Image (cartoon, coloured by chain):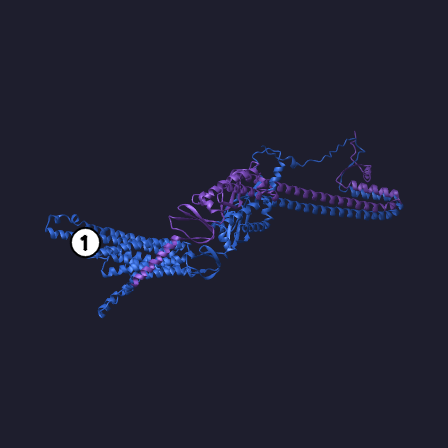
Chain colours: A purple, B blue
Amino acid sequence: MKRNILTVVIGAVLILIFALLLFVFQVRQSEVAVVTTFGKPVRNLTEPGAYFKWPWPVQKVYKFDQRVQNFEDKFSENLTADNNNLLTSVYVGWKISDAAAFFPKFAGGSVPAAQRMLESMLRSAKSAVVGKHPLADFVNANPQDLKFDAIEGEIESAVQSELRTNQCGIEIEFLGIKKLGLPESVAQTVFTRMTSERQVLISKLQYAGEAEAQKIKSAADRQAAETIADADAAATRIRGEGEAEAAKTLPVFQQNPELANFLLRIGALQQSLNQRSTLIFDERTPPFDLFQHMPTNSPSQQP
Amino acid sequence: MERNTQKNGLVNLIAAAMIFVAAFVVTCYVNSLAGQAASIFLGLGALVAFAGWFQMRLEENERLEKLEIDELARAKGESALFDAKESEVFPAHRAREQFEKFFVPGFAVLLFLLEAGGAWLLWRWISRTTNVIVPERAMPSLALFAIFALLLFLIGRFSVTIARLQNHRLLRPSASFLLAGAYVCFVTALGVAAVKAEFPRVDFYVARALCVLLGLMAAEMLVTLLLEIYRPRVKGKITRPIYDSRLVGLLGQPESLFTTAAQALDYQFGFNVSETWFFQLLQKNLAMLLLAQFAVLLLSTCVVFIDAGEQAVLEHFGKPSGVLTPGAHLKLPWPADKIYRYRTDQIQTLDVGYVPDAQSENEKTILWSVAHTKEDNFLVGNRESVTIQNDDDDTNDTLKAPPVSLITVSIPVQFQIADVRAWAYNNADPANLLRDLATRAVVHYLAGVDLNDVMSHARLEAAQELQSHIQVAADECKLGVKILFVGLQDIHPPVTVAGDYEKVVGAEQTKLAAILAAQAEAIETNALADALAFTTTNIADATRQRLEVSAYARAALFTNQIPAFEAAPSVYQQRAYFKAFADATANSRKYVLLVTNTSDVVVFDLEDKIREDLLNLNVPNN
């Protein structure tokens, strides 16, 4: 008997658990739910809690994440207003604003299907907006000329407008440009240009260095020449002073000009013969005039 | 009774197979190393159970065949039927013999290979793997392993008793494996519990111990196979199956060591000391035990332990009812209350612009010109390019590159969850969204700055500005995070052009070198000029001094010469003249012509002679 009661209790517990699983479901804070009766949506639950339902196949519960979901579209190529090819990728934060409207539009509320639709809208809007702006609106060394926020706003407005028109039960919370890039071929030309810019800088630096060196050398030569010229001038002046001082002794020689002149001539003679020279004298030149009275080889007597 | 044994064998096979599959799934779910080893053990048990059950079927067929033949023999007496060959008359008997002769040894070899291979591969794998038990999955896994242990124990114990009571040798291997499997599952559950109790290495050591067990089983199987070769075959003698492991039997029934002693006691005292009262108890209260197990499992969900550094959101029927901080908490059992854990104190990092690479992390040197991670290129403004293009605006160059540059950045962003509710409930994938926001902030910032600025002086400001932008964006999206650090750890031109940027630095150095060389030469030139100037002025000073002194000296001499001259003017002149003449011509070549007594013409060749050695030079002929 005791064993039977126990079996009944266990059976009751198991049935209770099974019944709870069949008749009760929970909706989390982060979820919204749509309850369908034989496929027809009858309840839209947005508040968290435990709810009753009839078991399958009478009622079915479709739960959706009502938090903001984000996805990123493909990194796609578009032409800017100034004919530059630009790759862009945009991320979007979206949420289900009306589960009742969302549920029938996307095959039982398929989030991937909703994202596919959003992505196609997004790509269309993005292409249109990118085509209206020059590249300088996306990338500019002067931040005040950048129109990044405005471009994002334009894309978001275009997508929001499409969503409102279609009444998909979705709304965009935020949108941002995640990635900018250039196609590979264009990127190569940018690399080439960056390399050329570096070459220009290298040449600038190289020739600036040589020019600067040349200037320094030239200035040094000029300064050296000035220094030497100043020194020569000073030397000439000093020598002049010496000459002037020496000239002060000339009145002494005026006491006997004859002797002074004689001595000057003697001095000049000495200086002029100071170098290696060859002198030819005849017998009349003193002191060789002494040879005049010396016996010489007489011409042979003619018989 | 025989049919019941066969059913027992089938039950053992089904139980072993199902629990093997379930244990493997739970092991994958919880990432337990010991669970892997236990799964291998249970898988081997399933194979043994299959072999035992199959052999039982063959023996049962043989028994039925024998009964049928005996019945026919009794009914018809001697018949030609029994003159036929044995294989034609007793096909079931023949099948059983063939099975024992070929399949059983082959199966034993397979078992040995699986045990040895399993032990070796598992040992190597657990030495290298980084798998650890997922803490939040530990409790359900622990409970499930405990249930497996209980089920295996009950079924195994029952089978062992049946095998022993009826002395059924073919039921014993699977029964032993089930019992041993129960202990293995129990030990695995203990390992998981130890990990939950902050002893993370216990699971590893249990796995190692089970590897050793598998190795021992393989060694035992090898020895059994060798002994089987030399075993004397006695016709009609029933032998123990080769795949019946004594080691597993001992493990499953350690009390069997005492069986002999117990039988002696039974004989001595007249009652069964070895009677399995525990099994009887279990058999009577199986339902209660299962219910208790379920209750324990449910009660275990009423207590939650939040680890240090964690916070958990408690949901009551899906509605957030509080945030649990580290410590022990009580809650309603699952599924009424559920918790979702988040590591709020942990500093988390996301990487923008690069994908970290374990190999490059170990590199000691990071160069611009060598790619060290998988890096993305970002568009950045370039004033130099704009200037050059403005200069060349009149040129119609359709292939002109756009006035932007490319740059590579590596920016780690570190953050902490500041508001766990906002993190959990506002965004479906907050970590990914934060990555998007950070990347967008970097792209936006770089698009509006100059390449050279951001690589040099604007770097620090850039980091601060980026941190501020990311924080603002995260707050706008209600992410509930605090951005702790944004590091511009690596900003450089792409690898393709990085070498040219380095060459600019080289050119700068070359320029400085040329200037320094010129400065050195200028210093030399000026120093030499100063020296020459000094020499020139000194020489002039000396000349002046000489002029002055010699002038005064000559004047003094002249003053003294006047009296001598006046005393004898002609003699003085002659003396002075001859003295000067002698001094002046002392080194001169002199020719004196005495021409008074001749009319000869004297011709002097005063031309200098050329040195003879200069005339004898030999000019080589090419």
The x, y position of residue B16, in whole percent, is: 30, 55
Query: Going 47% across and 62% down the picture, which residue do you hit?
Result: B327
The image quarter containing residue B506 is top right
Q: Nearer the viewer, residue B126 or B578?
A: B126
Seen in the image, is B31 located left or right of residue B247? right
For residue B22, say whether it is visible: yes
Rate crowding at label 1 as few (under 14), some (14 to 19) or many (20 or more) other CA atoms within 10 Å.
some
Image quarter of the N terminus of chain B? bottom left
Circle 1 SS class: helix
Q: Nearer the viewer, residue B619 or B571?
A: B619
Amino acid type, residue under disc 1 in the picture: Arg
Q: Decide: is B121 above or below A110.
A: below
The x, y position of residue B305, in whole percent, is: 45, 60
Q: Nearer the viewer, residue A7 or B267?
A: A7
The x, y position of residue B490, in whole percent, is: 54, 49
The x, y position of residue B369, in whole percent, is: 53, 45
For residue B367, say whether it is visible: no
Q: Nearer the viewer, residue B272 or B412?
A: B272
Q: Decide: is B8 above or below B617.
A: below
View extreme (bottom): residue: B269
Q: How many marks?
A: 1
The image quarter containing residue B574 is top right
View extreme (top): residue: A303
Give the residue pinned by disc 1.
Answer: B63
Seen in the image, is B445 located left or right of residue B566? left
Image quarter of the C terminus of chain B? top right
Badge 1: chain ID:
B
